[in-house]
Amino acid sequence: MRSSSEEGAAQDTGSEHVAEFIDVSKRFGDILAADRLNLGIRRGEFLSFLGPSGCGKTTALRMLAGFEPPSEGTVRIDATDMSAVPSHRRPVNMVFQHYALFPHMTVAQNVGYGLRQRRPRLPKSEIGAQVDKALATVRLSDFGTRRVWELSGGQQQRVALARAIINEPTILLLDEPMAALDAKLRAEMQRELLDLQRSLGITFVLVTHDQEEALSMSDRICIMGRGRIVQVGTPQDLYDRPCNRYVADFVGKANILSGEVVAREAGQARVVLGCGAEVLVPEGNPDGRRHVDVVIRPECLSLSATHQDEDAAIRARVTHRTFLGDHTEYLLQAEGTGLLQVNLPRQAERTSGGHGVGDDVHILWAAGTGLVLAADD
Amino acid sequence: MTRDNSPITRQKFMEELRRYEKGSITRRHFLGATGLGTAMAVMGGAVPSLLPGRAQAQDLGNRVVLATWPNYHDAANFDRFAEETGVFAQVNVFGSNEEMLAKLQAGGSGWDVFVPTNYAISTYVEADLIEPLDLSRLPNYDAAAFEQRFADAGTIDGTTYAVPKNWGTTGIAFNSSKTGGVVDSWKTFFDGARDQFDGRVMVHDYQLTTIGNALVYFGHSFNSVDPAELADAENLLIDVKPHLFAISSDYQPSMRNGDAWLTMCWTGDGKQMNSDMPEIGFALGREGGEIWSDYYAVPKGAPHREAAYALINYLLDPEVNAREALAHGYPVADSRTNALLPEELLNDPILYPAAESLTPLEFGAAVTLTDPNRAELMARFKSA
Amino acid sequence: MAITQARARALLLTPAGLWYAALLLFPLAVVLIFSFGERNPIGGYAPGFTLEQYANLPARFAAFRNTLTLAPLGTVAALLIAYPLAYYLAIKVSVRWKTTLLILVIVPFWTSILIRSYAWIYLLGGNGIPALLEAFGLGELRLINTPFAVLVGIVYGYLPLMVFPIYVALEKLDKSLLEAASDLGAPPWRSFLQITLPMSMPGVMTGSMLVFILLTGEFLIPAILGGGKVFFVGNALVDLFLQSRNWAFGSAVAVALIVIMLIVVALYTRAVRRFGVRRDDVGLM
């Protein structure tokens, strides 16, 4: 899917892009961990690399940090080629997945480590002051003399954060930093990270396999799969206009149905689905294929006991119903389509009265909703 | 010097290693000190015991424990003894008389037969560690066949505690291709060490011989415990020390590979080196030195006393003893045995030196062994 | 419940307790008692109560001096050689070769140190390395029967004991710590000094203590490779117990050695604590 990645990142001006991957590949033996990556990271943005494990997102981050040299291509930071720049000279800092705090140092010594590496040396008093400031930023002011192994997971995480931001890096790299935290703490940390990013104004690059985390935090998301960049865009872009089945499936809940195009008109395709229903669906990149996949989000469908003429309808039976407060999730079995999910907002349920498990209903598909997906690679 | 520079051959190394395994190059110190001797003995004891024992008329048991010196027996004789009696000999080798004494003093040695040297026997008697021998149970021992001076240390106040095994001397082994000729005086030995043989001379790690020969250098008695005479010896030894190649009773490897040219040497070692390398000769110090005699004895509380008598009696059989002598190369005091030995062995100047060269030699005295001042002198010398 | 636990503890600790009592405390008590006794005129121990043996300790000053010079020197030399080797094995070498190389480090242990030391007699003797150096025109050199030969033997003999604890410490070092240090601006040599070295300190400490303590009691290597001219306390003890059989004085020398060893170990432990890592810290990983 080269077409949907940011082609020609190199043409963008240096001031807009704080870092760039230009045709970057990375091989570990026979394994191609990163395959011709091209990406520009914008100054000040919060960018996430999202994908399942082994998709190459961590490799991309590590090449940015300088832990892995690219096999081919160029990584630039601040318009400078990083090929010959070792990690300790790069203006980036990382929060490691398991924090990698130095166990033989106190919290304050950990946080001040980066400042102590500066040459010429910084005065002790200045290091002390900055450490205090950084600890205050992560709300750990009283913890400076503690040993890191005395802290809880969330506290260790904040120490790691303080240690990484004290150097005022051009880019802060975060390698699945929330993976080890429980759900509640994770949500709290996510908010804190966003606040921090806003107050510091530096570029954050996050690696995560958690799509909700990526959707909720990122300005832009770079979806990766099998070493390649599949799609880059804002969370909304990816949700509304997934370029292919992989992205549609990975980002948010999606019903993906296969069908046959019977007619094309003004950017829309008339598709006959497996169940026989005929729907009118927008098509992003018309390519003339007859057999296509169509995606439609659960909240774009509705249910009705009776069939109304203006919409396409799929006959189905309710197999599961889950009440989730603001909306209700229905799983339905339709002939020729497999399981479909429909989310009805509370309001809609009130008016229609809801449906029970075992009920035979019509799934309504408004004309012009959904999307014809481009072919996977 | 060209010979010196040739690196050791693989074959030669293996020979040395095999010698080491046999225990021959570690005459007085290492096997005992390291416990390896015990390990060998345990193996020696364990393997034959797997063989079925043989029913015997007398009840000798099937085991006898012998504490002796390294490379001092013909192993085939033990096999024959086992065949004839059903008793398997377990051989423990030791480094020094002092070490044997220490083991017996500590108790629980488990030995049945041991091999003290002449000067040690009275100490064993004094410490009540040695059994008077019932000579009627040693029919092969014929006192008349033994030269008196090699046998009389075994009898104290009319009681016989030990019967002679072998005798020998402590002389000088020299590598004639390096020394340019025979070295047969302690004067040349100690003066040469500080001069033309600098860094090439070895003395024993054994106070009795090292101090004794230093005393002889001054014309004092080998056995002197006189403080003034000992002070002479100490001055000499400490003066010589920086010029010595080593203080070690394990002199064969260094002599054989040419690192050392001159060493204090016991008869058997001299004979062994001379047989393999004719350029290594053995001579007695003209001024004097040590003559010694080893004995068989039974310690108090020997667990297999019957078998102990049987073994000693067997080893005193002239034919058996002759085979022993052929194997280890130490002279025998038993005329019956000597009658069976080949002429060239009896004429060997190393084994049986001319009587007049033996004249100035002295037997070690009991006090020479136990004198604390000599022990401390040796310690000062070694740590200087 | 409390009773069962107490009983369980007693059951668990009894074998080790008896073992220590029989093989450590009892002999130590004997040595201590002997050290206040006298030498039996024919050798051995005669009961008594005197401080004479301790007053006589200066007679073995040289042995203590040699031991307390060469043992630390040997420990340091072994450390300097073992650390890079352990570092290479733990961090640099590929997994494929690691096992093979580790086995190669252990292999010498399959042979008695006595036999291995004998091999060094030839290597360091006139026909060995000196002959080789002479062939290259490096002049005549005496190696065997010098303190240097003893040092070589010591380092050779005890190297594995030093390599393994350090290897284990480095092996479990979290590599992301080094990446973190580098990420925060530390060049490799500085991250080695600030992270790797302190984190491997427990291994260094274990190895050094192990080697130092064993070296302090060493007698075989100085006897074989020092030609009897390099006199350790261990040699003095062998002579006192097996040659001159002055058990009382030998016991006093042994007690003095133990006391000195305890003091050195205590000082060393404190020093390492100060500069290194608390065991808890490393336990985190």
Image (cartoon, helix red, strand yellow):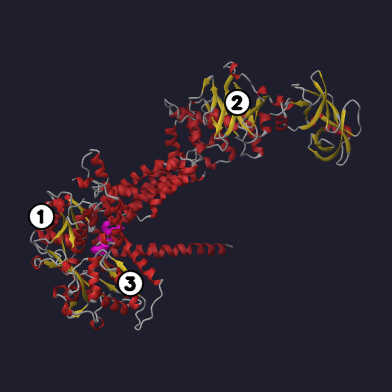
Q: Chain of mark 1?
A: B
Type of the residue with mark 2? Leu
Residue position marked by numbered label 2 in the rendering: A37
Left or right, B325 with reference to A128: left
**Chain part drawn in magenta:** C235-255
Q: Which mark is residue A374?
A: none
- Whether residue C51 is visible, yes or no, is no
Q: Is residue B285 above or below residue C79?
A: below
Residue position marked by numbered label 1 in the rendering: B188
Circle 1: is it few (<14), some (14-19), or many (20+) Cα within 10 Å?
Answer: some
| Depth check, front residue: A176 or C30 | A176
Residue A221: where, in percent of width, then height?
66, 27
Quadrant of the rendered image containing residue B371: bottom left
Element on which disc 1 rests: helix
Give the alpha-carbon distance from disc 3 to disc 1, as whole Å: 45 Å
Give the alpha-carbon distance from disc 1 to disc 2, as whole Å: 88 Å
Q: Are marks 3 and 1 on the same chain?
A: yes
| Depth check, front residue: C262 or C112 | C112
Residue position marked by numbered label 3 in the rendering: B79
Left or right, C280 with reference to B184: right
Dominant SS type (magenta): helix
Circle 3: is it few (<14), some (14-19), or many (20+) Cα within 10 Å?
Answer: some
Q: Residue furthest front?
A: B343
Type of the residue with mark 1? Thr
Left or right, A376 with reference to C38: right
The image shows a total of numbered marks equal to 3
Q: Is residue A198 above or below residue B266?
A: above
Type of the residue with mark 3? Asp
In percent of the image, x 23 and y 63: which residue is there?
Answer: C244
In percent of the image, x 43 and y 64: which residue is there?
Answer: C19
Residue A3: where, in percent of width, then height?
67, 22
